Amino acid sequence: MKITSLILFFCLLCTTGFSQTLEEEKAAIAKTVHLYFEGMIERDRDKLDQAFDPSARLIGYRGDKFTVTPYEEWASGTARGAKRNPDDFKNHLIEIDIKGYTAVAKTELFWPGIYYYDFLTLIKIDGNWKIVHKTWYEKKR
């Protein structure tokens, strides 16, 4: 009976530790995704660079045209211009799925005149979560 109790105790201890680690990883991923959101609204290249790996690709349709955009090209264009009014933009992190050092984050972005649905692939690189791929769908309001 004592051995069974000890085994159960250690199993619970390991499960609790894993759960906390998983929650910490989700919080770190959420931080990366929010840097992406803030970087777009504020047109802040530093925040975008913190969120994305330089080799990232952004893939989706602009209207009827299929596009594949290297991160550098997208970030340079996104960072140009005046800071946007954050009250006009509603960005939501919907879901995070983690498997080892990889993760997928599902987001919804409600921007003036358009909705974006992003699927972000992240990888943990040197202890930091980075977006390495973005696939999006856009829908006119």
Image (cartoon, grey):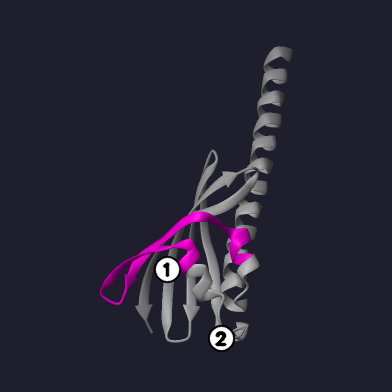
Q: Give the range drawn in magenta.
A: 47-73
Near-viewer residue (104 or 2): 104
| Residue at x-position 72% and y-position 19% | 6
Q: Residues within 10 Å of mark 2 (few under 14, many from 20)?
A: few
Q: Would residue 53 be counted in the magenta stretch?
A: yes
Percent x, y of residue 71: 48, 62
| 17 is higher (above) or lower (below) than 93 | above
| Residue at x-position 62% and y-position 43% | 22
- Mark found first going from the N terminus, 1 or 2: 2
| 10 is higher (above) or lower (below) than 64 | above
Amino acid at pointer 1: Tyr
Q: How crowded is mark 1: few (under 14 residues within 10 Å), some or many (20 or more)?
A: some
Quarter of the picture holding the N terminus = top right
Near-viewer residue (22 or 125): 125
The reply to whether residue 56 is visible in this rendering is yes
Image quadrant where residue 47 sits:
bottom right
Q: Do the residues labelled 1 and 2 touch (CB within 8 Å)?
A: no
Tag 2 residue? 88
Secondary structure state at the residue bearing disc 1 = strand
The reply to whether residue 133 is visible in this rendering is no
Tag 1 residue? 117
| Residue at x-position 42% and y-position 68% | 117
Secondary structure state at the residue bearing disc 2 = helix
Relative to 70, 122 lies left or right: right
Amino acid at pointer 2: Asp
Q: Would residue 79 be counted in the magenta stretch?
A: no
| Residue at x-position 47% and y-position 86% | 112
Q: How many circles with numbers are drawn on the protein?
A: 2
Image quadrant where residue 45 sits:
bottom right
Percent x, y of residue 129: 60, 50
